[in-house]
Amino acid sequence: MYAMKEGDYVAGKTISDELHGVVMPSKKSEKIALKLDSGYNISIDRKNVREISVIERQKTSKKDKEKIHPKQGLKSITILHTGGTFASKVDYGTGAVSASFSPEDLLEMFPEIKDIANIKSRLIRNMFSEDMNFNHYNLIAKEIASENSDGIIITHGTDTMHYTAAALSFILKNINLPVILTGAQRSSDRGSSDAFLNLICAANFIAKTDFIGVGICMHENLNDENCLILPGLKSRKMHSSRRDAFRSINSGPIARANLKNIEFISSHERKNNNRKLELKLFNPEIKVGILKAHPGLKIEELLIPLFENIHSRPSKSHFHFFISS
Ligand code: ASP
């Protein structure tokens, strides 16, 4: 009854339920851990299982994975991974949540992407985006500059993705290719993940257009149909968990993208070979503060240590000063 191994797809019955799912490693021998078709993980007491049988043995092993051969006529896209929820993947071999980002892994998770472009994929950091700082923005920009592809996708944690998009918009002066940031509100291996649509729409947008610049590609609404390409410099995450959390601020979206079509909503810069990328890297000593403007704002509020040099040395200072109301 229990001749099943990790990674096998099984069907079973407990006292109260019928179950279908993939066997995951379980730390306790008296429990069976399953990843259900719905994407949820459960742990069941073996004594509550009435019957269970293997429907399909685990198929993929590292050796079996598909090898990629570049296809003529397709653009090249490099995916630079930086971590966040998008990067989370359950490894059924070990049970650990791990990040595995070879092009073969990506094809396995999102095979549709290989019909859109010739994909190269690298992990440049594996971190949550709340830990990013100006050094990371510089690092991502240098990685982009070292690539030779038609376009770049950056997978990123969503919490500060709009800060990175804005920072890259400043650093990548005269950019002559598309750089599209995308992420996910639910990890890529879950049935309910938004990662697939976000990534495929980003790839499709790069493949089918001559857009240049920095953009964000995330769901337009709660349906899994369309994504919006939002301006990197003017967008913000407005909700912690909704798939359509990103909105452009003081500006419209650039385009609507789905698995088939791209529809431009506002004007955009196009590829122009006279442009030569120049990196305007941030000074790593930069300090950034946000001061909330309010009625009755007092000069003393500008004199806290972070802001105190603004008036005395505005031109030489590394301070960047935003007033938000
Ligand atoms: N805290 C995570 C991050 O921003 C959330 C996410 O990836 O969406 O890295």
Image (spheres, grey):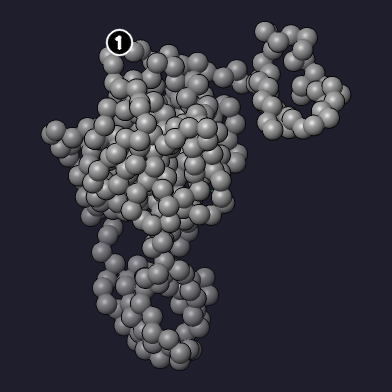
18 or 195, nearer to the observer: 195
Provide residue 249's location: percent of width, then percent of height: 52, 35
Provide residue 167's location: percent of width, then percent of height: 52, 27
Other residues around mark 1 within 10 Å, as few (<14) / some (14–19) / many (≥20): few
Provide residue 194's location: percent of width, then percent of height: 41, 54
Q: How many marks?
A: 1
Q: Image quadrant for the N terminus?
A: bottom left
Whether residue 236 is situated above or below residue 187 in the rendered picture: above
Q: Check disc 1 and report the residue beneath it.
A: 274
Whether residue 9 is situated above or below residue 189 in the rendered picture: below
Whether residue 174 is situated above or below residue 195 in the rendered picture: above
Quadrant of res 255 = top left
> Disc 1 marks which amino acid?
Asn
Q: Image quadrant for the C terminus?
A: top right
Residue 88 visible? The answer is: no
Provide residue 24's location: percent of width, then percent of height: 42, 69
Q: Residue at x 80, y 18 (%)?
A: 308
Residue 295 visible? The answer is: yes
Q: Horizontally, is 244 left or right of 310 in the view?
A: left
Q: Horizontally, is 306 left or right of 175 in the view?
A: right
Q: Residue at x 54, y 39 (%)?
A: 236
